[in-house]
Image (cartoon, rainbow, N blue to C red):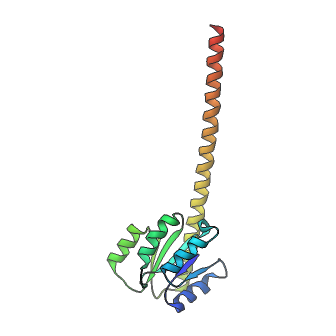
Amino acid sequence: ILVVDDEVCNRTIIASMLKNQFIVLEAADAAEALAIVKNHPTPENISIVISDQRMPNMNGVELLTILSVILPKAIRIIVSGYTNVEAFIESINKAKIYKFILKPFERESLLSTIESAIEHFELKQKSDQYLQSLEQLTATQSKELADKDLELKSLRRDKI
């Protein structure tokens, strides 16, 4: 889980809540978050990104919009103390946000959201793997049918 917040206290609180169950990466701003993702040996394993909305240089929606391309399977969560309806709508539509959490948040509420997000991520991975195996099976069976078709056509030609 990648936690991005320019306020050390907020970042530390969220990270400390999650560190017992998850590997938590921390970034002080969007640039640091992007560097962490870029340098991560297996960025596709970053299952959740939790970002503050208001940060210097790049806000959370902008960061998560970029990360939606780089980490398309990661679940994206915005945490904000500001209740701007336009920001809610923008973040959901533009950055494909899973959840918008208002500060101050309750510990249990955040943990429940994280658990749901992890379940969503894992189900999506299983679904993708199943789809890939079906595609491979279909390709194999299609090739076998094509081979049998050629064999039958060859047998017909031999009889004629």
Q: Residue furthest left?
A: 86
Q: Residue 116 is drawn in which quadrant? A: bottom right
The quarter of the picture where the C terminus appears is top right
Q: Position of residue 54 (x, y in %)?
A: 41, 84
Vertical relation: 152 (above or below) 142: above
The quarter of the picture where the N terminus appears is bottom right
Residue visible at 54% across and 67% down in the picture: 74
Q: Position of residue 90 (x, y in %)?
A: 36, 72
Task: Identify which residue, 79 or 123, lies in the foreground.
Answer: 79
Residue visible at 59% across and 84% down in the picture: 15
Q: Residue 20 is drawn in which quadrant? A: bottom right
- Side of 64 relative to 88 (left or right): right
Vertical relation: 95 (above or below) 142: below
Residue visible at 41% across and 82% down in the picture: 57
Q: Position of residue 130 (x, y in %)?
A: 61, 51
Task: Identify which residue, 58 or 146, lies in the foreground.
Answer: 58
- Side of 157 relative to 6 (left or right): right
Vertical relation: 124 (above or below) 145: below
Residue visible at 55% across and 80% down in the picture: 3
Q: What count of labels does the image hold? A: 0
Q: Is residue 97 visible?
A: no
- Side of 33 relative to 153 (left or right): left
Q: Is residue 120 visible?
A: yes
Q: Residue furthest top?
A: 160
